[in-house]
Image (cartoon, rainbow, N blue to C red):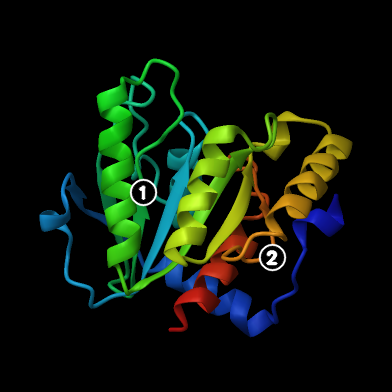
Amino acid sequence: MDKVLTNKQFDENTMEQARLLFARGTTFVKGVVSLSGLPPMDLPEIAFAGRSNVGKSSLINSLTNVKGLARASNTPGRTRELNYFSVDNKVNLVDMPGYGYAKASKSDIKQWNNLIRSYLQGRANLRRVYLLIDSRHGIKPNDIELMDMLDESAVTYQIILTKIDKIKKSDVEKVYNEVLGLVQKRSASYPFIVATSAEKKDGIDLLRSYILTAIEI
């Protein structure tokens, strides 16, 4: 388990700079429903994607230390916006719409796919996409579809396992190794997985350091 949580070592200076970046404050900027509403590409962007109920909102709140910053929809799969958050005016975090909700209509799915594909292919300042995977369930077909889209768009992405506090330590290591074996074969994947618990703060410092090095501030 300890090996899973420290899969790449960062020096103390990097860890501290990452902590300070997120300690300076994060604010909500805007929700974007079409490409015309996207902000200028003058800041690096880090995007978060995942299935509905994977824990994106909780992770973003834990990452930024701002309770309630990202709000989960009361109806899973309902949110269809790219929600922008500014971290100290140094980097924008982008909360992408959740996918994979069973009751989503075909038109909603098509709208999601069109928005996300256009976003991924048109943002030169997008440094990395973090794809969240629920550690209790592992990778699902919808996740594979998004990985295919990311590979085709040549957008670097990194896997975050969420809710590791909800399963046994041995099961965390099992799903970690299974997911790692799959993503290592992918052309655009970043070969380190971050295992997290938003509630327990496990892996959050490590994630901040990955983000810092990705944006190269």
Q: Give the amino acid at mark 2.
A: Pro
Residue 71 disc label:
none
Kindly check if marks 1 and 2 are in contact, taking CB atoms under 8 A apart as contact: no
Given residues 200 and 37, the one toward you in this image is: 37
Residue depicted at 71% across the width and 39% down the height: 164
Give residue 124's position: percent from left, percent from top: 32, 74
Q: Callout 1: 10 Å neighbours few (<14), some, many (20+)? A: many
Residue depicted at 72% across the width and 60% down the height: 184
Compared with 16, 78 (above or below) is above
Q: Quadrant of the C terminus?
A: bottom left
As drawn, the residue found furthest toward the left would be 36
Position of 111 with respect to 165 (left or right) is: left
Q: Which residue is mark 2?
A: 191
As drawn, the residue found furthest toward the front would be 152
Residue depicted at 25% across the width and 36% down the height: 111
Residue 95 disc label:
1
Quarter of the figure with residue 119: bottom left
As drawn, the residue found furthest toward the right would be 170
Residue depicted at 65% across the width and 42% down the height: 200
Position of 109 with respect to 140 (left or right) is: left
Count of number-bearing discs: 2
Compared with 190, 76 (above or below) is above
Given residues 69 and 30, the one toward you in this image is: 30
